[in-house]
Image (tube, rainbow, N blue to C red):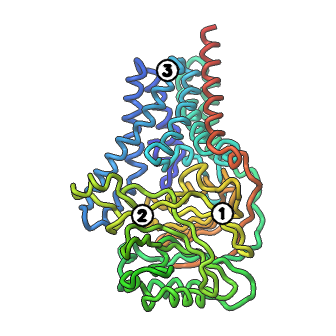
Amino acid sequence: MAAGGFQPVGLWPLTLFGTALLVGLLARARGPWQAAGCGWLWGVGHFALGNNWIATAFIYQANMPAWLGWVGVFLLSLYLAVYPALAAAGATLLSRRRPVALVFAFAASWIVSEWLRGWVFTGFPWNPLGAAALGGFTRAGLAQVLPWTGTYALSGLVALLGGLWWLGWSQRVARPVVAIALVILPLAAGRLPQLTPADGAGRLAFTLVQPGIPQEDLDNPALFEAQFATAARLTRRPPTGVPRLVLWPESGLPDYLRDGYPARFYEATTYAADPVLARQRIGRVIGPDSLLLTGAVDLEIRRGRAVAARNVVTALDGQGVIRGSYAKAHLVPYGEYLPMRGLLEPLGLSRLVGGTFDFWPGPGPRTLDFGPWGKVGMQVCYEIVFPGEVVDPAHRPDYLFNPTNDGWFGTWGPPQHLAQARLRAIEEGLPVLRATTNGISAVIDAQGLVRHSLPRPVAGRIDGVVPPPHDATLFARWGNRLALAWAAALALCSALALRARRG
């Protein structure tokens, strides 16, 4: 039930109810081990429903049957459930199952467990509990507190509100007025109205392109030229003399844009097997006053053979000159590389994304200054879900660009991915522009409000100006240390409640 608060369902009361039931189970547990078992079983159901979109990825992998996707979802849930189990055990140990102390201890433990989930074994922080508190496109709901809490602490606040529901239920006979208040307060908090007006307009013009390429067609060489033609048609505009930013998605360009690769690698691309001609053609498409940011692939060549690839964003100007690039740092295990390849490949396991070699990671968040086109921070696809890891704090950008391919994430994955991009916008105080192959593309302002969007599965473009950034938020300065400070404060509240109970 708690996963029902995530997109695309978006029913906030289900998150409260599911969390409240878990706290009630912990209150009756006979010790931390039994509490951990309750948390683990709760987590299996929670993650199996919330991550069901992962099963869809196997439809596009010829080397593995589609039914294996559901086995993969279940096995992943068995692991992810360890983190609610840790939160449950920690809450029981800290509170000794005293009701008020338990509610605060559960919230504190949840923050720490989600923080651990964000980095252990490279991390998988998809669908933090706080994502359920995010309002619709035109309001941020309870997520408005993110600049002062961060996502992990927002999740702790959601856990606290769910605990208050259980506390209200437990007090329904002895203190009915308190019980009613403890039910109404969390409901109201989860649907908090927008407290500040929408930001004004910025100055930098942009064209964001969603080519509408179905996932099953994306890697078909016979369709590469038609796909490029679609992107070109959606990009062109009459010359204006005004600088314009053009945004294409991840997997937006099949051409290898860099020189120096063996000729055989250029032969399967779209334009004359020549990177110079490919770049010049793109320059003519975007025009002399434009800068294109597009997803592409760079190869790592050793002794005339490709040994690895990098998932990059390449910046091209109107003359077809490469102005800079960013290589994805947070790669997807089993999607972009196969962990323990020497052990797993002989067993018949492979990556979900086709290819005979792995992607290599880049160095991490970088800000690239493109002069009239602004300072941009880039996060490719999955990278945007990592709180505190999307911005170079020493060189704060004007906006974030998040090119992605969500076409193999089913119907649940794309709206969840968009929700997490909105969380990053709010906690960092930066607008986020998302260009996707097949939806959902969106322009998100620094308050997390969706200014414009293109639904699945259409081809289209968005024209506008990049929303302005805010000053660096408290979270932007402190990062996840801020969330851990909130965890410590909630643990202190639990200790004080426990001491008051003893007194």
Viewed as shown, does residue 197 lie left or right of 389? right
Does residue 377 lie above or below 159 as drawn? Answer: below
Viewed as shown, does residue 15 lie left or right of 499? left
Q: To which residue does mark 1 refer?
A: 367
Secondary structure at badge 1 equals strand
Q: Looking at the image, is mark 2 or mark 3 earlier in the sequence? A: 3
User: Which residue corresponds to the image point at 35% horizontal and 86% vertical from the top-left?
Assistant: 222
The quadrant where residue 224 appears:
bottom left
State the quadrant of the N terminus.
Answer: top left
How far, Cα to Cα, is label 2 from label 3? Answer: 43 Å
Inspect the image, locate mark 3, and give the three-letter code of the amino acid beneath it.
Answer: Leu
How far, Cα to Cα, is label 1 from label 2? Answer: 22 Å
Does residue 481 lie above or below 468 as drawn? Answer: above
How far, Cα to Cα, is label 3 from label 1? Answer: 44 Å
Residue 473, given in percent of the width and then of the height, sits at 73, 49
Residue 211, given in percent of the width and then of the height, sits at 50, 78
Q: To which residue does mark 2 refer?
A: 359
Q: To which residue does mark 3 refer?
A: 93
334 or 131, which is in the foreground? 334
* Residue extending farthest front: 303
